[in-house]
Amino acid sequence: MKRKIYSLLVFGLLIGSAACRKGFEDLNRPYSDADDSRISIPGLYNGMVESFTKYGDDALNVSLLYPITNQQAYQNTLAPYVNYAGGYWSLYYPVLQNYRQLMLLIDKQPDKAAFTNVRSMATILLASRTLRMLDYYGDIPYSQAVKAADGSVNFRPAYDKQADVYKSVLADLKAAVEGLTTAAGQTSIGASESFLKNDIVAWRKMGNALRLRYAVRLYNKETALCNEIIADIIGGNKPLPENQSVAAADIWKDNFGLWPDNFSNSNIFGSLDSKWNSYAELSISNMRMSSNVWQQMSSSNDSSGAGIFDPRCYVFFMTSNRDKWAPQPQDGSQSEGGRPYQGGMTIRRPFGDDIANKFSCVNFFMAADRLYYPLLIITEADVYFLKAEIYQRGIGVAKDITKAKAAYEAGLRSSTDFWYGYAKNSEFWTSKPVPPTAGQMTAFLTNPKVAYNGANDADALRKIATQAWLATMFQPWEAWAIVRRTGLTPKDPNYTPSVVNKLPYPDDETINNRDNWQKATNGASPGQQVLQKVYWMP
């Protein structure tokens, strides 16, 4: 037991130094006036950043999240996702350890106020990870976690109540955003700031965007707190992503996550290999564009694509090997016998080479892009859909259906522009989709399945949820949150997915932290744990 816990402790400490390798060599050159007492600050910080390159969730996405969110066909019978349920858990705690060591090191500096921006940036990064942990698992070890060095009482950390951790992290986020400063005297870690390149405005936007996301998510449980957050950000006109530029030099400034192009060596992105490898598996590469999604993007089943009104369809998906737009029934009533990609998915099969591939699938360039594909956390489009819901419901601000419609349509434009901008910027996309014309965008916004009517609350909220769900097609963990929170996303009438409200705790918790696991679960099996709702679910 002690060896295991102290191994985790040491591993967390070593992530910072390991981050100085594996493609981070150029990023971790000592900053100006560095000395031995400060040399680990860039390493610890980039240890946190580097951890984002190992999301490790692709198997979980296709075995669980895509099926239960009704987003992809064929893989609509749950695979043994329990095998993958602990992946995010195991990646989180070394990051928490790095963060706490970084805070201790900053506090030891004689001029620690000069590290306020580094502290704030690290806090925002950790918050994004902690909030997702809560969305996945519910109660988690947090306040006592990774503190084994403080004494044996912390060897087996208690599980904190998720409501308490949500509120604690949101308070930390607020302090972090308010702490960011452009005043002189801040110590810059220069190129070692490998996430948002020391762009303080972008950091403020990201922090506020996360606060807004969780103010909406927690609203029905923590109304007073969430009203306060929304009033502060929306009413106070605090910086948020808006008016994005999709040029390669700017797209990341309003669409937050890890962009390989921002790093000197994109080969560090193990998760892009993981994404590719997950598609290469037979059961997963048989994943297809679902009839459920197709119904939200096309007004007819015309196999020529004549009915497609949502321009994102051409980026997200591709025709079958018969060169037909053909969705697979969500319920799996029609099987798929072909393979759309050739030679270990290194290229798309030429048309007619395997006509047994009769259904449309994920766009080859999207699936195989290891050069530029971003690991997204929150985008400008996500924020616009949050604002649309805020104004439509009148939460934290006065109800205003005109502003709700404007935000909703801005979200649609933002999502479309983003994905076409991504494809244009990526060198991997050797065949670029042609962006929609102004007329095609107008047709998109006015299509009956999309057109906004704020006078009808039920219809407006359903369309906001639907478009937020589509915009997060490649953020399935976020789509899962939208599905669980709203209950308004499209569902195939012939396919009812299994109920999974949260992930079960990893099996090794029953051995290494059994008493606290028992208190958190009452001894429930994994199959029983997944039926328990996370805090914010209705």
Image: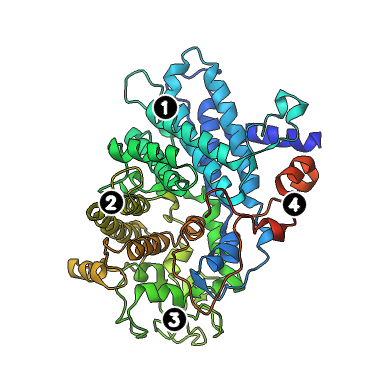
Which numbered disc, 2 or 3, marks the residue that appears first in the sequence? Answer: 2
Residue 261 lies, in percent from the top left, at 40, 49
Residue 45 lies, in percent from the top left, at 51, 32
Q: Which residue is mark 4?
A: 507
Q: Is residue 74 visible from the viewing direction of this image?
A: yes
Cβ atoms at labels 1 and 2 below 8 Å apart: no
Instruction: Say what secondary structure mark 4 lies in.
Output: loop
Are there few (<14), some (14-19), or many (20+) residues within 10 Å of tag 2?
few
Mark identifier at residue 320: 3
Q: Left of 196 or right of it: where is 403? A: left
Residue 536 lies, in percent from the top left, at 52, 49
Nearer the viewer's eye, disc 1 or disc 4?
4
Marks 4 and 2 sit apart, C-alpha to C-alpha, by: 45 Å
Amino acid under label 2?
Ala
Residue 197 lies, in percent from the top left, at 38, 37
Instruction: Say what secondary structure mark 3 lies in.
Output: loop
Position of 88 relative to 192 (above/below): below
